[in-house]
C-alpha cells in the first residue's frame, strides 16, 4: 500500500522504504526524482539516517540545485514487535509551491508596505490641502462680506450724487430767477450738476465691477466648498484603503506562516 501514497497526496511526493543500511524501495514523485536505486546505501546526516539512529521522526531540506526542485525529506523509523528499529519509511515532497507561496507573500508584503507608505503621504498631503482649502473658503466668505459692504457704500454714494444733482438743479433755477445777478451762481450750479452726472456714471461703472466681483466671489466660495467636500471624501477613501492594506498585510503574514507550516517539522 505504501506506493499508493504518491497518488493519494495532492503534491509532488515520492516515497521510499529502507532497512538499516540501504534503500529497498523507491518511487519518485510526478516531477521530483531523486534517482534512488534499490540497494543504494544510506548517507550520513540524511533524514532517513538520522531517523533510524535517533529513533524519531526527522526532516531535512534538499537544495534545488541537486535535483532541479527544492524538497523536504521526512523519515519515520520502523519498529518491530520488540520495538527495535529495522528500517525507515521516507516521504520526499517538493516544496516548490511552498517556496512560491513564500515569494508571493514577501512580494505582497513589500507592495503593501509601499502602498501603505504612499497612502500615508497622500493622507498627509490631503490634510494639508484641506487646511489650505478651509482657509481659502473663509477668505472667500470674508470677501463676499466686504463686497456686500462695498455695495452699501455705493448705494450711499449714489444717493449723494442724486442729492448733489438735485441741489445743482435747484441752484440753476434760483440763478435763473434772480437774472443777471445770479449768472455767476448759475455757472457754479452747472458745474455742480456736471460733477453729479460724472459721479453717477462712475458709480455705474464701479457698480458693474462690484457685481462682477460679487458673482466671482460667490462662485469661488462654492467651488472651494466643493473642493473641501472632495478632500473629505478622499480622506475617507484613504482610511478605507488603509484598513484594506492592513488586512492584506495580515493575509500576507498568514500566507508566509502557512508556507512555513507546510514544510516544518
Image: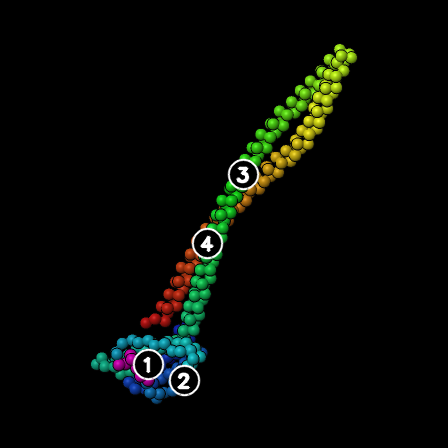
What residue is disc 4 on? 120
Residues under numbered marks 3 and 2 in contact, where contact means CB atoms less than 8 Å apart: no
Name the one closer to the observer, 258 or 88. 258
Secondary element at tag 3 = helix
Work out whether mark 1 precedes mark 4 in sequence or the reverse, and give the earlier one: 1
**81 up-or-down from 202: above or below:** below
Residues under numbered marks 1 and 2 in contact, where contact means CB atoms less than 8 Å apart: no
What residue is disc 3 on? 139
Give, as a single range, the part of the protein colored magenta: 43-53
What residue is disc 2 on? 35
What residue is disc 1 on? 46
Say which quadrant the C terminus sits in: bottom left
Q: Residue 224: x percent and y percent?
A: 55, 42
Secondary element at tag 4 = helix
Work out whether mark 1 precedes mark 2 in sequence or the reverse, and give the earlier one: 2
Q: Quadrant of residue 6?
A: bottom left
Labelled disc at residue 211:
none
Distance of label 3 from label 4 (alpha carbons): 29 Å
**Label 4 Cα crowd, 10 Å radius (few <14 / some 14-19 / many 20+):** some
Distance of label 4 from label 2 (alpha carbons): 54 Å
Can residue 239 be seen here?
yes
Work out whether mark 4 precedes mark 2 in sequence or the reverse, and give the earlier one: 2
Residues under numbered marks 1 and 3 in contact, where contact means CB atoms less than 8 Å apart: no
Q: In which quarter of the image is residue 170?
A: top right
The nearer-to-camera label among 1 and 3 is 3
Secondary element at tag 1 = loop
Distance of label 1 from label 4 (alpha carbons): 50 Å
The residue lying furthest to the right in this view is: 180
Can residue 172 be seen here?
no
The residue depicted at 56 percent of the width and 38 percent of the height is: 140
Q: In which quarter of the image is residue 185?
A: top right
Q: Any magenta on residue 99?
A: no
Amino acid at each position: 500500500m505504501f506506493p499508493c501514497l504518491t497518488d493519494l497526496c495532492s503534491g509532488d511526493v515520492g516515497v521510499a522504504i529502507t532497512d538499516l543500511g540501504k534503500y529497498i524501495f523507491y518511487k519518485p514523485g510526478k516531477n521530483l526524482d531523486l534517482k534512488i536505486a534499490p540497494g543504494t546505501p544510506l548517507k550520513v546526516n540524511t533524514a532517513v539516517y538520522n531517523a533510524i539512529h535517533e529513533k524519531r521522526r526527522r526532516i531535512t531540506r534538499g537544495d534545488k540545485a541537486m535535483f532541479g526542485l527544492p524538497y523536504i525529506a521526512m523519515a519515520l523509523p520502523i519498529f518491530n514487535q520488540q520495538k527495535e528499529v529495522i528500517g525507515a519509511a521516507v516521504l520526499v515532497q517538493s516544496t516548490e509551491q511552498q517556496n512560491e507561496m513564500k515569494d508571493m507573500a514577501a512580494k505582497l508584503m513589500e507592495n503593501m508596505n509601499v502602498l501603505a507608505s504612499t497612502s500615508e503621504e497622500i493622507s498627509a498631503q490631503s490634510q494639508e490641502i484641506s487646511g489650505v482649502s478651509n482657509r481659502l473658503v473663509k477668505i472667500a466668505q470674508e470677501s463676499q462680506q466686504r463686497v456686500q459692504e462695498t455695495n452699501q457704500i455705493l448705494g450711499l454714494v449714489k444717493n449723494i450724487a442724486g442729492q448733489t444733482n438735485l441741489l445743482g438743479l435747484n441752484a440753476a433755477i434760483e440763478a435763473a430767477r434772480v437774472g443777471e445777478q445770479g449768472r455767476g451762481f448759475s455757472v457754479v450750479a452747472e458745474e455742480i450738476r456736471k460733477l453729479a452726472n460724472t459721479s453717477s456714471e462712475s458709480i455705474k461703472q464701479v457698480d458693474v465691477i462690484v457685481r462682477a466681483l460679487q458673482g466671482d466671489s460667490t462662485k469661488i466660495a462654492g467651488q472651494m466648498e466643493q473642493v473641501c467636500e472632495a478632500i473629505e471624501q478622499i480622506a475617507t477613501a484613504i482610511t478605507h484603503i488603509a484598513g484594506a492594506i492592513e488586512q492584506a498585510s495580515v493575509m500576507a503574514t498568514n500566507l508566509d506562516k502557512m508556507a512555513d507550516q507546510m514544510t516544518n517539522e
